[in-house]
Image: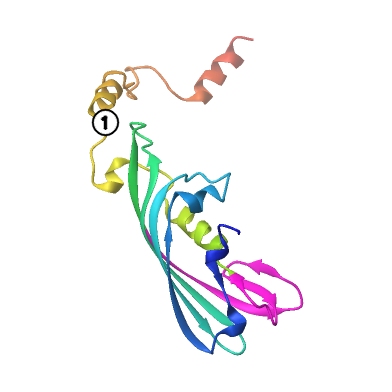
Amino acid sequence: MDALEHYSIPVSGLQNGPHEYDFDVDRTFFECFPESPIKDGKVAVHFIFDKRPDMYTMSFEIQGTVHTTCDRCLEAFDLPIEDEEILIVKFDEKEWEEADIIYILKGTEKLNVAKYIYEFINLAVPIAKTHDDADEECDPEMMKFLKANQIEDVPEEGSSTSIWDALKGLQNDN
């Protein structure tokens, strides 16, 4: 049995109207995506599937933590994430996607939402991940090392840091 089958919604057997589901995402979920930058986490997903005769609306409320590495001190930590996303599902003669709209074949019996949960969890992770995001302190030993080896950005008086000035010097040598 497919590990992601649990995330399939039986759309053909549902009555019109909203239907709510709760999913718990953990390490086994992320293992199904081998190229995932996230390898572990504990994320709760509240999913609302609103079935209408002409389209479906899918709402995702994501809240939890993902295990990642601090970009400042390189220590592993649990980063809190939270996000809300909405997808519209419409019908077409072929399956395709654009921005926040998914097109499926009319009469599709079930719709697997694992891919969208995976994408929204990844989008909820900030580009720069630090302990500050988790209201924690970075590794004190690493911070001492970083401060001791910090390079001053202040140029000496009379010196120029412009690359263009360096290139002008090359022109004057000829």
Q: Which residue is mark 1?
A: 139
Q: Main secondary structure of the magenta part?
A: strand
The residue that appears at 39% across and 57% down in the rendered structure is 43
Q: Quadrant of the N terminus?
A: bottom right
Left or right for 149, reference 128: left
Residue 80 coordinates in the image, percent (x, y): 33, 52
- The count of marks equals 1
**Which residue sits furthest top?**
173
Residue 120 coordinates in the image, percent (x, y): 48, 60
Left or right for 156, reference 21: left
Q: State which quadrant residue 103 falls in.
A: bottom right
Q: Nearer the viewer, residue 135 or 146?
A: 135
Q: Quadrant of the C terminus?
A: top right
Callout 1 crowding tier (Cα within 10 Å): few <14, some 14–19, many ≥20? some
Residue 115 coordinates in the image, percent (x, y): 57, 60
The residue that appears at 60% across and 9% down in the rendered structure is 173
Disc 1, SS? loop
Q: Is residue 139 above or below residue 106?
A: above
User: Is 107 covered by the magenta stretch?
Assistant: yes
Q: Is residue 85 above or below residue 73?
A: below
The residue that appears at 52% across and 57% down in the rendered structure is 119
**Which residue sits furthest right?**
93
Q: Amino acid under label 1?
A: Asp
Residue 158 coordinates in the image, percent (x, y): 35, 17
Left or right for 128, reference 29: left
Colour pattern: rainbow
User: Is 9 covered by the magenta stretch?
Assistant: no
The boundaries of the magenta stretch are: 82-111
Q: Is residue 80 above or below residue 106?
A: above
The residue that appears at 76% across and 78% down in the rendered structure is 93
